[in-house]
Image (cartoon, rainbow, N blue to C red):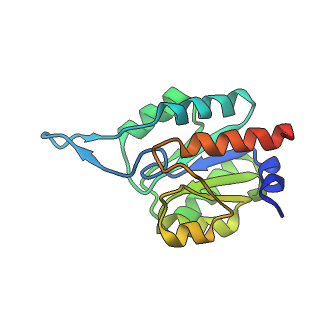
Amino acid sequence: MTIEERAKRVRLLVMDCDGVLTDGRLYFGAGGEELKVFNARDGQGIVDWHKAGHRSGIISGRESQIVDLRAKQLGISFVYQGRKEKVSAMNELILEAGVLREEVAFVGDDTPDLDVFPFIGLAVAVGNAHDAVRAAAHLVTNAAGGFGAVREVIDMLLRAKAGL
């Protein structure tokens, strides 16, 4: 099956956070507060995805109030944090969303994301993902995580759905 055929089926976009929506670096303030940097273009892409009638989610091995805040700002429907074992989280998310596995795209960057790839319709690695993740993905973005990779995926999904 081609990437375009897989993309046309996608109704739910699920992303890892650190290394996908961010550049993967962890920032800590002097008081121990955690900071994250998100790309505004990725955010606009997520908004466009939702405007087109689709939903999105985040599965992250870490927990952060910042992720909840950003997800709320963007209208992300499903946020599963503190889930180092991502297959069970994905199974729960798929049930909650009421979609089929082949209607899910997942964007990852590191080895904990690998287990999800065989169970979904479109497995995507960001451009700077771990070698094993890039090798297992159906698609590898040109952009690095935190630098527009999510927007690149969304633009491709929307083009495929429009038949462009």
Residue appearing at x 62%, y 43% in the figure: 152
Report the side of 75 relative to 38 (left or right).
right
- 110, above or below 150, in the image: below
In the displayed structure image, the side of residue 20 where residue 92 appears, left or right: right
List x then y, in percent, for residue 51: 70, 26
Judged from this view, the residue extending furthest toward the left is: 30
The residue drawn where x is 47% and y is 64% is 110
- Where is residue 27 drawn, in percent x and y? 26, 45
- Residue 77 lies, in percent from the top left, at 60, 37
Instruction: Please tell me whether residue 15 is drawn above or below residue 35 in the rendered image.
Output: below
Number of marks in the rendered image: 0
The answer to whether residue 112 is left or right of residue 122 is left
- Residue sitting nearer the eye, 77 or 155: 155
Q: Residue furthest right?
A: 163
The residue under the point 42% across, 40% down is 67
To which quarter of the image does residue 101 belong?
Answer: bottom right
Q: Quadrant of residue 157?
A: top right
Tell me the quarter of the image containing the N terminus: bottom right
- Residue at 37% from the left image edge and 37% from the top image edge: 66
Which quadrant is home to the C terminus?
top right
Residue 139: x %, y % from top left: 66, 59
Q: Decide which of 150, 104 is in the foreground and name it.
A: 150
